[in-house]
Image (cartoon, rainbow, N blue to C red):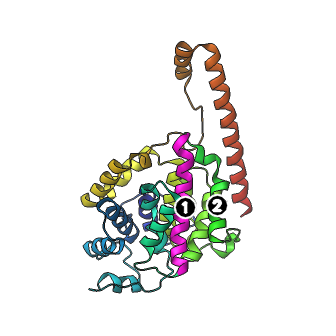
Amino acid sequence: MLGAIIGDIVGSRWEFDPTNDYNFELLSKENSFTDDTICTIAVADALLHNRDFGESIHDWCNRYPHPKGGYGGRFVEWIFSDNPTPYNSYGNGAAMRVSPVAHWYEDEFQVLDAAAATAIPTHNHDEGVKGAQTVALAIFKAMEFNRYHYQEAALHIDEIIKECVDFSGYDIDMPKSSVLNKFDETCQGTVPVALKIISMSTCFEDAIRLSVSLGADADTLGAIVGSIAESIWGIPLSIRSDIRDYLPEELEIVLMQFHSARPRSFKPLIDTTYAGDDFSDVSWDVLCDLDGKDACDALKMDAQNEKALKRQLMVKRAKAREEW
């Protein structure tokens, strides 16, 4: 959930002024939250207080009627309607706001049902519903891997992506030229690209930079990619800290309440880029003292083997990016 908000804020500066520079300034005074953050918070608030998703989204968007970048034309009409009804949209807004449900439920079918429910108040087209469900499924599957073993999801990205492709029928083998600098507001044009980016990424920040520097719908693609990347790698503490400066107090309160209700969803992962040793020499000395030399050697060998596998996967992803 926080990953979606970070992706939104980082991408907000480039929504209507696209960049292909991977090394762009991550955060500046020109960045702000957009409708993606507001709607994500609304979904989280609905879960916290057992509210109807549509009612909560309608409420929160009316609290912030003029966010950076504004709202889409049909969605604006829905927001300011006294009797809002679905309008058969298949826009990517259904996918950018869905992340909280994947953190809330512990059963896959509940996640998929709730993901559909977050989309239907506005995006009740089959493609809108499917886009929301696919993103929620990716997050949920990654969290399942990480729940029982530290950073396990990063070793199974290909499996996670395959499950999402099998579920959705999306083709993620599109050539880069077909999506580079192309502003596509649809779920079917955005979610497959997000999955492709995740399949080539090596850490949270790398995924965000890839999504924004594609020159597409930067804030929404960033939000979708960020929501999945968070569940795989976690969020570096420095980014987690810096992003708070961009949020109004009442949005921050919802984040804190959600954190309190679902603390496992905010687990910080330290070694996000798999660089360096998993433990310092001092840590290994402590293990030797506590557990004996044999136990220490075995643990160290296991860590080295896993690190080698992680580096192999990073090389594979780097090669895929060069060939894309």
The one nearer the camera, 125 or 302, is: 125
* Residue at left offset 61%, top offset 54%: 201
Q: Is residue 43 visible?
A: yes
Whether the residues at callouts 1 and 2 have beta carbons within 8 Å, the answer is: yes
Q: Quadrant of residue 303?
A: top right
Q: Is residue 147 magenta?
A: yes
Q: Is residue 197 above or below residue 286?
A: below
Q: Is residue 14 visible?
A: no
Residue 87 screen position, x and y as percent: 43, 86
Q: Which mark is residue 137?
A: 1
Residue 285 screen position, x and y as percent: 55, 17
Residues shaded magenta? 126-149
Residue 74 screen position, x and y as percent: 40, 86
Provide the major secondary structure of the magenta segment: helix
Quadrant where the C terminus is found in the figure: bottom right
* Residue at left offset 71%, top offset 68%: 173
Residue carrying label 2: 163
Residue 54 screen position, x and y as percent: 35, 75
First in sequence, mark 1 or 2: give its number: 1
Q: Quadrant of residue 288?
A: top right
